[in-house]
Image (spheres, grey):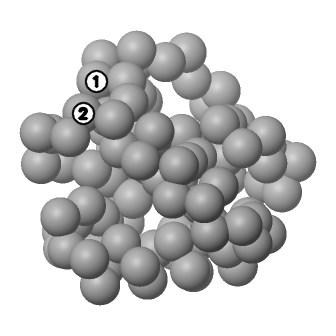
Amino acid sequence: MSQLEAKLELYTKALTEKAGMKVDAELLKAITKAMGPSIYNADAEIVAASDKEEVKRYKTNFISKKLGISDDAEIDSAFDKAVEKIGKSNPRKYRAVLSYILVEQLGKESLFV
């Protein structure tokens, strides 16, 4: 099993078990690949939802720039809903999992597949 396959398996499990979602494997793979090498770095693969600076960076770089959402209220609401779906107390908020939830939630699948 390749490193990418292992990560996809981990993220699929997190989405199905923690978020209760049905996973589109092709979409998850595309989003995960878009994360680049950050998924192989233990610190970078996690979004620290309690770190205001990291959250601001994630909202700017992913939700605003990558997904093209410019309304601050929509960005904040979408991020909060995605974190809630994973579980606020869940310390493992994988970047690819959070991104997958946001992509589906905001209807931006066409940007990846």
Residue drawn at the location 45% of the way across and 39% of the way down: 81
Residue 104 in the image: state x and y as whole percent: 67, 37
Q: Judge by depth and name the residue closer to the eye, 90 or 45.
A: 90
Packing grade of label 2 (10 A; few <14, some 14-19, many >=20) is some
Quadrant in which the N terminus appears: top left
Query: Where on the picture, by quarter, is residue 8?
Result: top left
Callout 2 secondary element = loop
Residue 49 in the image: state x and y as whole percent: 25, 61
Tag 1–tag 2 contact (CB < 8 Å): yes
Which comes before the other along the chain, label 1 or label 2? 1
Q: Judge by depth and name the residue closer to the eye, 96 or 78.
A: 78
- Left or right of 9: which side holds 43? left
Q: Amino acid at mark 2?
A: Gly
Callout 1 secondary element = helix
Query: Where on the picture, by quarter, is residue 44?
Result: bottom left
Instruction: Relative to 95, say whether 65 is above or below.
Output: below
Q: Amino acid at mark 1?
A: Lys
**Tag 2 residue:** 87
**Tag 1 residue:** 18
- Left or right of 68: which side holds 34? left
Q: Nearer the viewer, mark 1 or mark 2?
A: 2
Residue 65 in the image: state x and y as whole percent: 70, 79
Residue 40 numbered mark, or none? none
- Left or right of 10: which side holds 111? right
Residue 40 visible within the image: no
Residue drawn at the location 20% of the way across and 74% of the way down: 51
Extreme-right residue of the structure: 110
Packing grade of label 1 (10 A; few <14, some 14-19, many >=20) is few
Residue drawn at the location 12% of the way across and 48% of the way down: 91
